[in-house]
Image (cartoon, rainbow, N blue to C red):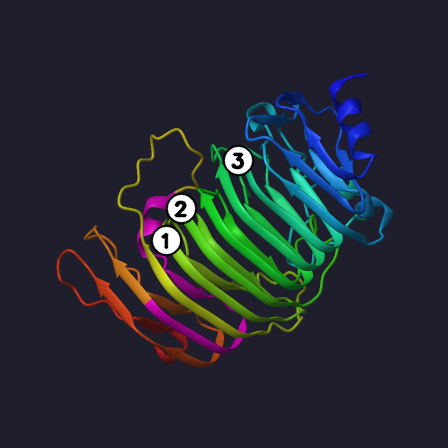
Amino acid sequence: MNQTEQLQALLDRRGTIVFPSGEYLIEKPLVIHDNTHLMLAPDTHLRLPDTGVFSLIENDGLCGEHENFNIKIEGGVWDGTNLGCERKFLSPGESYAEGGTFNKERYFKNDYLGLLIRLVHCRNLYFGNLTIKDPLSFGVQIADVRDFTVENIYLDYNCKKRNMDGIHITGPARFGVIKNIHGVANDDQIALTADATALTEITRGPIEDILIDGVYGESTYTGVRLLSSGSPVRNITIKNLFGSCRYNAVSFTHHDQHPGAPSLMENIHLTDIYMTKPASFDMNDGLFHFENEDKVALSCPLIEFFPGTVTKNVRIENVFRREVRNEVDAPLVKIRKDAVVENLTLGTIVQSFPDGREVPAVVDRNKQG
């Protein structure tokens, strides 16, 4: 048997499964079942082939379209070896968002995004104490999940591909804890998307009752993104954000995933935020960047409400922001034109800039001429 078959035979036993130390080439997605606790030693390294565009692991309910219960995955290094990989792209006229049509068969094949880990239709899920390395796009997508914990994840990303999310939660999702996410993503370190793109919307629905506690990254893309385009996002606490962000620490988005669909994000609490814009931005660092990203990084607010969003009952407090670059002109909070924010409450906010300037805490484009 090859290595993939050996590991799959272990998983098929269910119960507590330990993969031995070593490096394993995974030639097709591993499949995990109900009532399975998969444990990997820290030096156990699972990797895709150099040109592999598929998942390292999935649950059997993904393609079977049934619920899985009591899955636990922890330990090891999960490596997408993305340098030699190229995903497919949509045909001209097709859209990732803005009304793009979801194709289930295309999602199952996974060759348009190469999502590294996919866990869908899960109840009582644990995923933690591991490293995700160089995925082609998302490190992990978790969709249609209830009673879940994701913790102690290190994103070891080369940032040479687009859409390199860390932990991507797709609705419906409820009763979850996401904590201690370290590293640098080339998209969102954590995304809560009640509604998703034409390539990723295997499910959609409300995201409710989620705690995000501990997001760490220097010059990461965005710390936490919330998205509602038809389904609500509510009762979310986001706390203990550290480091610097090229775009936003927290973004409230709509992105017209479903044109005309309502957006609602409510009862959102942001607290204990220690983030700034990047202290330096070396465009020759060998990493993948978008055009003019230095300028964007300097002007993007830490917290941004995007057009088309409706957000109610937001509290932002205990923000300690100490910028080190005079060029930074980003406010702390920006409410974009055509974004609706009802009942925004601010607690303790401390901002400082090296030249002593006072930058407004909140800029509301709807109130400006």
**Amino acid at the residue labelled 2:** Gly
Q: Is residue 13 left or right of residue 58?
A: right
Local packing at callout 3 (Cα closer than 10 Å; few below 14, some 14-19, many 20+) is many
Q: Is residue 299 above or below residue 287?
A: below
Q: Which mark is residue 161?
A: 3
Quadrant position of residue 319:
bottom left
Label 1 packing within 10 angstroms: few (<14), some (14-19), many (20+) = many
Q: Nearer the viewer, mark 3 or mark 2?
A: 2
Q: Residue at x 33, y 45 (%)?
A: 294
| 333 relative to 15, above or below | below
- Residue extending furthest left? 355
Q: Which residues are magenta?
A: 292-318
Seen from the viewer's position, the closer of residues 141 and 196 is 141
Give 215 or 95, whichever is nearer the viewer.
215
- Tell which of 270 and 136 is nearer to you: 270
Whole-number angstrom distance, CA of label 1 to CA of label 3: 24 Å
Q: Answer whether labels 1 and 2 touch (C-beta < 8 Å).
A: yes
Q: In whole angstroms, how far apart are the C-alphas of marks 3 and 2?
A: 18 Å
Residue 3 in picture, x, y percent from top left: 74, 20
SS for callout 1: strand
Q: Label 2, on which residue?
A: 217
Can you say which quadrant of the picture contains the C terminus? bottom left
**Residue 33 placed where, x, y %?**
80, 43
> Mark number for residue 242?
1
